[in-house]
Image (cartoon, helix red, strand yellow):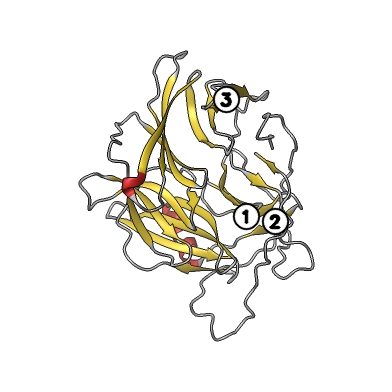
Amino acid sequence: MLCSKTLVEVAKVELPFEFDMSCCTVVGSVNGLICLVDTFDGRKLYLCNLAIRRYKHIGNSSSFRRCIPANPYMLLGFGYHRESNDYKVIRIMCINTFGRSIQREVEVYSLGEGCWRKVGGAFPWTLLSQSPAAFVNGNLHWVVYSPEREVDEVVLSFSLGEEVFREIEMPDDHSPDSLTCESLCVWRDCLSLLEYCPDLEEDACENCYLWVMKEYGVSDSWSKLYNIVLEGRVERLLGITRFDEIVYENQENRVVLYNFENHQAKYSSTSFGGPYRFDVVPLIESLLFLEGEDGVLDQESSFEGTSCEGSQSKKKKKKRVPKKNKKKKKSL
């Protein structure tokens, strides 16, 4: 883990379960909890509180196990629903049924209920990438293709409370081409969009644009606030910090923090190239899931999270998710 102000390594964490680190991806981070997935086949999914070394394996649903032979393309998201005090994982699967058609299934895992549940209705959107979802205002967000609009690209939101999808239009002046790279993020509690077009010259600086939705859900409130010139070649846009810094990976596989207010750049001392990949998410240390509280997460406790339906014959006490405790310092 790196400090968000200095990019100095502040801690190393050994995960107590088998994980192919070259395929390990951070799905999201909320209130001190991190959701990890092995993207090789999506079977291994964990919730982790790294501050107190607590881990939980999330079992797979019966529908997901049936899809594994088809090697589904997946999109995941992780967030917190404040009203029900529940943490949820959403999994969108695109399954190629041996060349006949693309079948899409959506399911949600509720930590409070301890099981997966299918989300009904059609899913006509086309997934563009497996980039992490942006979690804002109780909703998860991705950039997708919409088959029902003249402008194909839209922001797709998923409400963790209602468990329904909605479309949000992209900015009017937003017209990406095949080379444009995009990343949804959160800046000052607002849904934001980072976009840049990679320069083919190795040492060239690259332009990056920051769009901010000032009023959530109102497409007319998109504003292009910054035109930022980043130093060196950008391999990946990784996000934005609350200190007005864009986080990206440069051509040397180092993490760069570029402050677009004072135009100062900081570089990590470590290069993250080689067989392992890295992700950047904000991490707030917390005491969630302390031993002895309701909803304790036993290390590597696993179960078959088949479905919430069909389990009513054997009534089980609903697992309560503990309320948030006092938070500690922040790190990246």
* 213 over 178 or under it: above or below: below
Q: Mark 2 points at which residue?
A: 55
Mark pair 2, 1: CA separation: 7 Å
Q: Are marks 2 and 3 in contact (CB under 8 Å)?
A: no
Apparent side of residue 13 relative to residue 102 in the rendered image (left or right): right
Q: Tell me the amino acid under the disc marked 1.
A: Tyr
Asked whether residue 169 is in view, the answer is no
Q: What element carries label 3?
A: loop
Q: Are marks 2 and 1 in contact (CB under 8 Å)?
A: yes
The residue depicted at 67 percent of the width and 25 percent of the height is 270
Q: Residue furthest bottom?
A: 313
Q: Do the residues labelled 3 and 1 touch (CB within 8 Å)?
A: no
Q: Position of residue 51 (x, y in %)?
A: 74, 49
Nearer the N terminus, badge 3 or badge 1? Answer: 1
In this view, 268 is above or below 172: above
Q: Mark 1 points at which residue?
A: 46
| Residue wearing tag 3 | 253
Q: Quadrant of residue 180?
A: top left
Q: Quadrant of the C terminus?
A: top right
Is 254 situated above or below 84?
A: above
- The crowd level at tag 2 (other Cα within 10 Å; few <14, some 14-19, many 20+) is many
Q: Which residue is drawn at 52% across and 35% down?
A: 238
Which residue shows up at 62% across the image and 55% down it?
A: 46
Residue 298 at what x, y percent from top left? 73, 63
Q: Is residue 55 left or right of residue 277?
A: right
Badge 1 marks a residue whose secondary structure is: strand
Using a 10 Å C-alpha cutoff, classify the residue at mark 3 as few (fewer than 14 neighbours), some (14 to 19) or many (20 or more).
Answer: some
User: Closer to the N terminus: mark 2 or mark 3?
Assistant: 2
